[in-house]
Image (tube, rainbow, N blue to C red):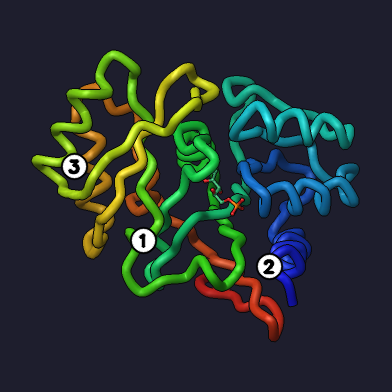
Amino acid sequence: MTQDEMKFAVAQEALKYVVKDTIIGVGTGSTANFFIDALATMKGDIKGCVASSVATAERLEGHGIKVFDLNEVEAISVYIDGADESDDGLNLIKGGGGALTREKIVAAVADKFVCIADESKLVKVMGNFPLPVEVIPMAANYVMHQITRRIGGTPFIRENFTTDNGNLILDVEGLKITDAKTMETEIDSIIGVVTNGLFANRGANVLLLGTPNGVKVVGT
Ligand code: 5RP
C-alpha cells in the first residue's frame, strides 16, 4: 500500500467522526486534502466548515462546501487534520505546511480533535521532524537566540515562506521532545512567538493511523 493509499483510507475512516448538521473544523496538508475530497461526498449532511488555511478554504469552496469565518460560529463539533509526528500520548508536531496557528485555534474551539496520518508519523520520541514556530518577522533573531538558550535545538528560518498571517516560520532541528506540554508552554512564552507546532496542551483525542493492514484507531 502506498502512503497516499493509507492517507486515502484514514480520510474515509474520518467520515465516521463527522457529526451531522454541525460545523466541522478542517485542517491543512495532503492528508487533510484527502479528507476534504471525502467530505464532499456528504456535504449535504453538514452545515459547513471552518478552514485552518486559505488553501483549505479554497479546496472546500471548490467542492461547494460552505466555509464559515470562525467568529461567525458558536461551536465546532470536530476538528479533523493531519500531523507531522505523533507520540503514543497523542501529542503532535504540526505546521509542516505552515498553518499551525490557525490549526491550533480551530483545534482549541473544537469539541474533539481527530488526527489522521499514515503510520510513518507515529514515533516513540518526537523531534526528528523539525518543530515549526510561527514568529512576528521583526522578532525572528531574538526568538532564535531564546530558543537556542532556553529550549535547545537549532532554529532555521523557513526560506521563501510567509504564513497566511503574514509571519515567518522557524523550523527547530535537533530536539528530543520528552515533555511536550512543558516545551509547548515554554516556547509560547517567548516574546515574538505567535505559536509553536506542538499540540500537547490540546492534543488529539483520536489518532487514525493508516497501515498496510488497514486503519488503526488510537484513543476514543
Ligand atoms: C500543516 C500541518 C499538516 O497537518 C502536517 O504538515 C501534515 O501534512 P501532510 O498531511 O501533508 O503530511 O500541520 O500545517
Mark nearest the camera among 3 and 1 is 1
Which residue is painted at 60% across and 47% down in the image? 79
- Answer with mark 1 or mark 2, whichever residue precedes in sequence: 2
Q: Residue furthest bottom?
A: 213
Indicate the quadrant containing the C terminus: top left, top right, bottom left or bottom right. bottom right
Which residue is painted at 49% across and 61% down in the image? 205
Which residue is the site of mark 1? 128
In the depicted structure, whether residue 206 falls above or below residue 105: below
Indicate the quadrant containing the N terminus: top left, top right, bottom left or bottom right. bottom right
Amino acid type shown at disc 2? Gln
Helix, strand or loop for disc 2: helix
Q: Nearer the viewer, residue 28 or 155?
A: 155
Q: Nearer the viewer, residue 82 or 203?
A: 82
| Mark 3 neighbour class, 10 Å CA radius: few under 14, some 14 to 19, many 20 or more | some
Residue 180 as seen in the image, left or right of residue 171: left
Is disc 1's CB within 8 Å of ligand 1?
A: no
In the depicted structure, whether residue 120 falls above or below residue 103: below
- Answer with mark 3 or mark 1, whichever residue precedes in sequence: 1
Amino acid type shown at disc 3? Glu
Which residue is painted at 27% across and 46% down in the image? 184
Amino acid type shown at disc 1? Asn
State how far apart marks 3 and 1 are (Cα). 19 Å
State how far apart marks 1 and 2 are (Cα). 19 Å
In the depicted structure, whether residue 109 falls above or below residue 194: below
Residue 17 location in percent, x, y? 69, 60
Q: Which mark is residue 186?
A: 3
Which residue is the site of mark 2? 3
